[in-house]
Image (cartoon, rainbow, N blue to C red):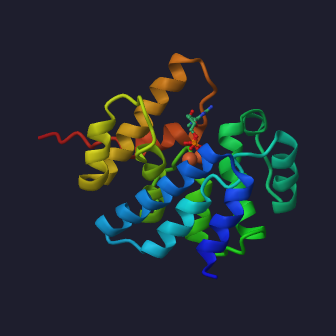
Amino acid sequence: MKKVDYILSDLKERLSPKRYQHTISVMMTSASLAMCHQADVDQAILAGALHDCTKHMKAEEHIELARKGGIELTDAEKSNHHLLHARTGAIQAQLVYDIHDVDILNAIRYHTTGRADMSLLEKIVFTADYIEPGRRGLPGIERVRYLAFHDLDRCIWEISTSTLSYLKSRNMPIDERTIETADFYAPQIVRE
Ligand code: DGI
Ligand code: FE
Ligand code: FE
C-alpha cells in the first residue's frame, strides 16, 4: 500500500466525515498548487493529507503529544485549539505516520499562522487550507483563489490580513506568527 493511501485510510477512521472531506480537498488543492508553481507534488499531497491530523483531539491529547514531542507550549497555545493542532499535527506526522521530511513537517506546523519567509511547500499548504473548494462564505474568496494560482505571495498577504481582521473583530487572541506573516508578505511600496 502506498504511504499516502495508508495515511488516508487511517485518517478516515479517526476524523469526522466533514474533517476528512476537508483533508481530501486540501490534499488535492495542494497538489494543484504544486503543479502550478512547479513544486514537488508528492510532498504537497503528504503535507495536505496530514495538515489537520490531530484536529479531532481533545486538549489532554494535544498536551500529551506535545510532551512526547518535547516541545514547550506557550500559554496562548495551551488555551487555543486552533493554534495547538498545527504544532501537534507535525509531531503526530513524525511519530505515527513516520514522516521525517522537515519541509513537510514545517508545512503542517505553520499551516494555521504561516510565518515569515515560508518555503514553497509551506506557502502551498497554508494557501490550500484557506481556498479549498469546501470553504464557504470567506470575504473575497474568488479573488483569493485567483491569486493563489497567479501571485502566491500576494495571496498569502490577503489571507493573513483577512484572518487578522476576523480575529480582531471577534476579540480573539492573535499569535505573533500571524502578524509576522502579514508583515512579511505585505506588498512593497515602490517609492521614486
Ligand atoms: O484547521 P482548519 O479549520 O482547517 O484551519 P486552520 O488551521 O487555518 O484554522 C483556522 C482558524 O485558525 C481560523 O478560525 C482562524 C484561526 N487562526 C489563525 N491565526 C490565528 C488563529 N486563531 C487565533 N486565535 N490566533 C491566530 O493568530
Ligand atoms: Fe488546521
Ligand atoms: Fe485545515
- Rendering coords of residue 103 (x, y %): 55, 69
- Rendering coords of residue 62 (x, y %): 81, 48
Q: Outermost residue, bottom direction?
A: 1
Q: Is residue 59 above or below residue 129?
A: above
Residue at image point 66% right, 68% down: 7
Which quarter shows the N terminus? bottom right
Tell how many labels: 0
Residue placed most toward the observer, 67 or 46: 46
Position of 76 with respect to 127 (left or right) is right
Residue placed most toward the observer, 67 or 182: 67
Quarter of the image for residue 14 reads: bottom right
Position of 101 with respect to 118 (left or right) is right
Q: Outermost residue, left direction?
A: 192
- Rendering coords of residue 111 (x, y %): 55, 51
Query: Is residue 191 in view from this perspective?
Result: yes
Residue at image point 41% right, 28% down: 137
Residue at image point 68% right, 46% down: 16
Query: Is residue 111 in view from this perspective?
Result: no
Q: Quadrant of ligand 1?
A: top right
Quarter of the image for residue 6 reads: bottom right
Which quarter shows the C terminus? top left
Residue placed most toward the observer, 169 or 51: 51
Residue at image point 37% right, 41% down: 157
Residue placed most toward the observer, 182 or 78: 78
- Rendering coords of residue 140 (x, y %): 31, 31
Q: Is residue 76 above or below residue 107?
A: above
Position of 182 with respect to 155 (left or right) is right
